Amino acid sequence: MAKQQKTCPKCFSEHAVKSGIVKDRQRYKCKECGYHFTVEKLGKQIDHYYVTKALQLYIEGVSYREIERILGVSHVSVMNWVKQYNIKRAENTEYRPTYQLFSYKELLAFYKDPANLKGAGMIVTEVGDKYMMIRWERFRK
């Protein structure tokens, strides 16, 4: 049976031995520096698709809470991604974004009506098995 090598996080030595169990996790002791450590805990990984979509929606003016409702990802995670990737969105007070979610058939029906295609900028993006249409409408004065 092959032994799995554990690396000390303090001195990066690969000479470590088992040293008990703490909170149901194997504990190790480094033979070089005497440091006790446990195996790294792997966090929950979120698919990069959702990170990209969340950042796109944020740039388009959708709020953190709305992104949370649309994608099912915590608004705090979205805030952290915005900070991590240093994303800035343009401040434009003359327009406001509105969004709608459509199935494929609903999107086709929406496009068939010419009145829906005039009077506002629009972008359509795929979100899971649905399509999201974001429109920018000018504030009426």
Image: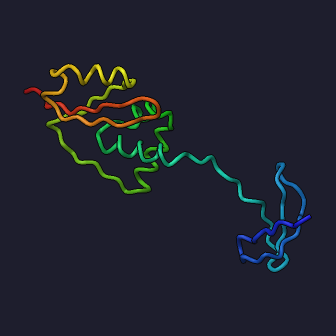
Q: Position of residue 75 (x, y in %)?
A: 46, 38
Is 14 located above or below residue 91 in the figure?
below
Q: Position of residue 118 (x, y in %)?
A: 13, 27
Rendered residue at 82%/73% (across/down): 30
Is 38 located above or below residue 89 in the figure?
below
Q: Nearer the viewer, residue 116 or 7?
A: 116
Rendered residue at 84%/53% (across/down): 22
Image quadrant holding the N terminus, namely bottom right
- The answer to whether residue 118 is left or right of residue 4 is left
Report the number of discs: 0
Q: Nearer the viewer, residue 36 or 16?
A: 16
Q: Position of residue 50 (x, y in %)?
A: 47, 43
Q: Nearer the viewer, residue 34 or 86?
A: 86
Is 139 located above or below residue 27 in the figure?
above
- The answer to whether residue 75 is left or right of residue 36 is left
State the image quarter where residue 114 is shown.
Answer: top left
